[in-house]
Image (cartoon, helix red, strand yellow):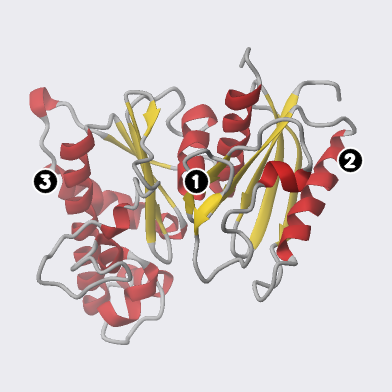
């Protein structure tokens, strides 16, 4: 294999995903490995092992490497500047120095990277105004406006889970009252269902069986999501909103009522509406985005 390629590494709390990707988006090799213990910094060696294994599989060195990780990326994109209490040693780790590479190793927030991946080779290919929400244990996100990834002063842009839907509601983990994350995130299902269900999967399964309480809780959650999306549409004017994460596995049980609520809530000048799409790249999105950013940074012709 002699094609010019980049390696995208997506560092998660559970797994490390690595992809070797050509400039046309073709995947040459793929590696998945456990991140390992978060009680120390041994997980860093696991990232290095994934990088080495991919290059050994392709049999030629990568032209460049990019990395996606949880937390707020530094302004110079060389490290994660803020990620307390998880993955010891991640904060301020300069990955270019760690990998001993001549080329820059751009470091992105994982949701930002996932959006770049979906715009490059996924559900929103070529989009210039796109919002991504990750619906899982919590709610994350990212936005591209007029072709530019919104980063913000500290890298906080895109934390859409911490939008306030109810100023009288209880504070979430950031102190935001009545947040979108608390209204739809998997971590609050038990509280939202008064202890009846432990996960969104259980809640949706019961709702499909016409359990009245489950259906009420689930539809209330989707209504809150629709209100959040309508607000984002008004603020950022996207052409496409991509939904990703484990909660999207609910399929039509999520997307059908969400569409009906948006028919009520969305402002549609001239009849124009934002397209709501399910993410296409799955758990590969962050690695695709990291590889794309590495190419943008290091390959002038890309």
Which label's residue is closer to the chain start, 2 or 3? 2
Mark 2 and mark 3: span between their CA atoms?
A: 52 Å
The residue carrying mark 3 is 265
Instruction: Find numbered disc 3 in the image and state the secondary structure of the residue it sits on.
Output: helix
Residue 133 visible in the shown view: no
The residue carrying mark 2 is 56
- Residue 74, numbered circle: 1
- Residue 65, numbered circle: none
- 10 Å crowding of disc 1: few (<14), some (14-19), many (20+): many
The image quarter containing residue 218 is bottom left
Please state if 140 lies on the left or on the right of 13 as rendered. Answer: left
Residue 172, given in percent of the width and then of the height, sits at 28, 71
Residue 8, given in percent of the width and then of the height, sits at 66, 39
- 10 Å crowding of disc 3: few (<14), some (14-19), many (20+): some
The quarter of the rendered structure image containing the C terminus is: top right
Which label's residue is closer to the chain start, 2 or 1? 2
Mark toward the viewer: 2 or 1? 1
Residue in view at x 25 percent, y 60 percent? 180
Residue 263, given in percent of the width and then of the height, sits at 14, 43
Residue in view at x 46 percent, y 42 percent? 112
Please state if 21 lies on the left or on the right of 48 as rendered. Answer: left
The image quarter containing residue 296 is top right
Please state if 243 lies on the left or on the right of 108 as rendered. Answer: left
Mark 2 and mark 1: span between their CA atoms?
A: 30 Å
Mark toward the viewer: 1 or 3? 1
Residue 59, given in percent of the width and then of the height, sits at 90, 33
Instruction: Find numbered disc 2 in the image and state the secondary structure of the residue it sits on.
Output: helix
Residue in view at x 39 percent, y 25 percent? 127
The residue sitting at the top extreme is 301
- 10 Å crowding of disc 2: few (<14), some (14-19), many (20+): few
Mark 1 and mark 3: span between their CA atoms?
A: 36 Å
Query: Relative to the observer, which residue lies in front, 23 or 83?
Result: 83
């Amino acid at each position: 294999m002699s094609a010019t390629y980049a390696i995208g590494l997506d560092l998660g709390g559970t797994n490390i995903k690595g992809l070797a990707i050509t400039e046309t988006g073709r995947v040459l090799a793929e590696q998945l490995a456990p991140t390992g213990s978060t009680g120390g910094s041994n997980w860093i060696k696991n990232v290095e092992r994934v990088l080495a294994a991919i290059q050994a599989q392709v049999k030629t060195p990568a032209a460049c490497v990019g990395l996606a990780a949880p937390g707020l990326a530094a302004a110079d994109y060389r490290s994660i500047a803020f990620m307390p209490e998880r993955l010891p040693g991640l904060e301020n780790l300069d990955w270019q120095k760690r990998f001993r590479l001549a080329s820059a190793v751009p470091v992105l927030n994982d949701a930002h990277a996932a959006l770049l991946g979906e715009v490059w080779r996924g559900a929103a290919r070529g989009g210039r105004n796109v919002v991504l929400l990750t619906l899982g244990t919590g709610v994350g996100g990212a936005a591209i406006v007029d072709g530019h990834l919104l980063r913000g002063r500290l890298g906080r842009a895109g934390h859409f889970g911490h939008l306030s839907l109810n100023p009288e509601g209880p504070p979430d983990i950031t102190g935001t009252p009545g947040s979108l994350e608390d209204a739809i995130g998997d971590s609050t299902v038990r509280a939202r269902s008064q202890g009846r269900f432990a996960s969104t999967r259980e809640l949706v399964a019961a709702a499909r069986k016409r359990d009245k309480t489950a259906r009420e809780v689930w539809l209330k959650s989707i209504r809150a999501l629709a209100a959040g999306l309508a607000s984002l549409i008004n603020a950022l004017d996207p052409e496409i909103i991509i939904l990703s994460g484990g909660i999207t596995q609910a399929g039509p049980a999520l997307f059908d009522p969400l569409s009906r609520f948006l028919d009520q809530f969305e402002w549609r000048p001239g009849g124009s509406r934002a397209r709501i799409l399910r993410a296409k790249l799955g758990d590969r999105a962050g690695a695709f985005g990291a590889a794309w950013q590495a190419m943008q940074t290091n390959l002038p012709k890309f």
